[in-house]
Image (tube, grey):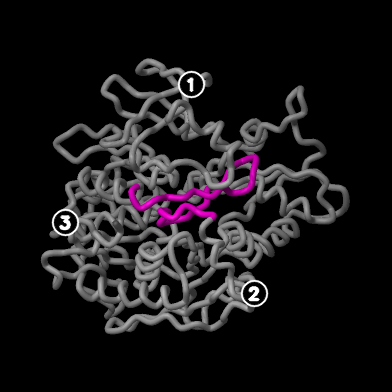
Amino acid sequence: MIDELLERTDSSSVALTVAGTDLSLTYEQLGNHVDALASRLREFGLGKGDRIATALPNGLDTVLAFLAAASVATAAPLNLAYKEEEFRFYLEDTGARALIVPPGGAPEARSAASESTLILEIECNGSRATLTPVKQPASQADSNAASEYNQDVALMLHTSGTTSRPKRVPLSQPNLMASVRNIAAWYQLGKEDVSLCVMPLFHVHGLMASTLSTFLTGGTVVVIPRFNALSFWSTVREHKASWYSAVPTIHQMLLARAKQGARPSGAEHLRFIRSCSAALAPRMMAEMEERFGAPVLEAYGMTEASHQMASNPLPPSERKAGSVGVGGSVQITILDPQGNHVERESAGEISIKGPNVFGGYEGNPEANASSFSNGWFRTGDQGYLDQDGYVVLTGRIKELINRGGEKISPREIDEVLLTHAAVAEAVCFGLPDRVYGEEVAAAVVLSGPTAEADLIKHCKLALSDFKCPKKVFIVDTIPRTATGKIQRRHVASLFSDQ
């Protein structure tokens, strides 16, 4: 089904361009490259049920690797910024049989791969795409190993919980296709549209919204290897981008550089601007529309739903500041703790149902038992439906830290801090931040002498920079409930003004 994305009547139209380079592929060229890479993967004995991990920077190689891996087996894209221990966990947890890396790059991912993992380097110069083995498995993998997994899974991602290790989210081919069809229809995407992809392609935001939905409708995707507020508008102008989707952090960076009263050159090409993955302040939405001259549509997505669950509509339909819109082809209801549907304007847990929603976490029956109620997936987010059916988020039931759209498990950081010889207790949480929405912080009880800077340095040895605490509060005790449980939000409130 993924193959449908590249089936174009006009195969000579441009499918993908990498900003700042000469790399540009038509739909015919992109399809040929994907076919060649898929055939190469089959030559290595990879097929349905096998997991193929990738550790690649944003760009052409990332898109090619995903499409080839998803058409042959299961793609498992990973964040290139992970440290070796993080790569090791995700590779082992996913059961990856192969790892695709850039030529000479991703050293920590390579080091983390097991002896039974095939490591392949991908390279595309525009006219030819290749996969070259740089490490063959030490032993032949069990040919029946893939039979343990769902053969229909196209994409394997992880989502973090607050009380457990990251959970595996298997997304099927039908899940992905339902999602991109919904996104494309909702924003009325067409072959004239140019999508500027500023989000990472190892997330569903950049992959599903910016990229695959555009391929489905025959438009052009312009990938930015790395977001740069200084060059953003020149890229919009050069490629005549008609829309882009980003987290509020990026919108705020662009607003900060926009001159008062002056519309950036290139903004006239924008048909709309989409915001997702974190809450967008109504004031920021108004400022963006005033400065950039395009309607701003806030959306609501998550990995388990193959990205989009709701969105504000295009004009002339009403878009509501402070709301993430309506579900479109995704059914949305509000459930109470017992699983009963509540009335409009009544708060509860936002729950969803639809062909884009995954069937359950892999190998985690306990999480599935608590996450589904009579076929409805419970998102862990609190909110309500207004009288018009628009979703309003009021908080997160789950205690994930949302740093600029990056969902971070505080327990993972707790565990790293607790490996420090001078730390007796640790609890991490999110604090309000003007730029990122939330920033990572921690409270620790010491058992020996150390300093805040040493604790942060300790975290940086094991965690990606975006996960590391920016502030560590050294305290005598960590507050607990009467039953001895720690409430992270309560702890956070104690330090929010410090």
Residue drawn at 81 percent across, 50 percent down:
423
Residue at left offset 33%, top offset 83%: 125
Q: Is residue 161 left or right of residue 36?
A: right
- Amino acid carrying mark 3 in the image: Glu
Disc 2 versus disc 3: nearer the observer = 2
Q: Quadrant of the C terminus?
A: top right
Between label 3 and label 1, give the one nearer the viewer. Answer: 1
Q: Which residue is mark 2?
A: 115
* Amino acid found under the numbered disc labelled 2: Glu
The residue shown at (83%, 46%) is 424
Magenta segment boundaries in residue numbering: 148-174
User: Which residue is farthest left?
Assistant: 10
Residue 231 in percent (x, y) is at 32, 68
- The amino acid sitting under disc 1 is Gly
For the residues labelled 2 and 3, say whether their Cβ atoms are less than 8 Å apart: no
Residue 404 visible here: no
Residue 98 percent location from the top left of the image: 52, 70
State the separation of the CA atoms marked 1 and 2.
46 Å
Q: Residues within 10 Å of mark 2 (few under 14, many from 20)?
A: few
For label 3, the residue is: 268
Q: Secondary structure at mark 2?
A: loop
Q: Residues within 10 Å of mark 1 (few under 14, many from 20)?
A: some
Quarter of the view holding residue 450: bottom right
Dot 1 lies on which element? loop
Q: Secondary structure at mark 3?
A: helix
Task: Write down the residue under mark 1.
Answer: 339
Closer to the chain start, of discs 1 and 2, is: 2
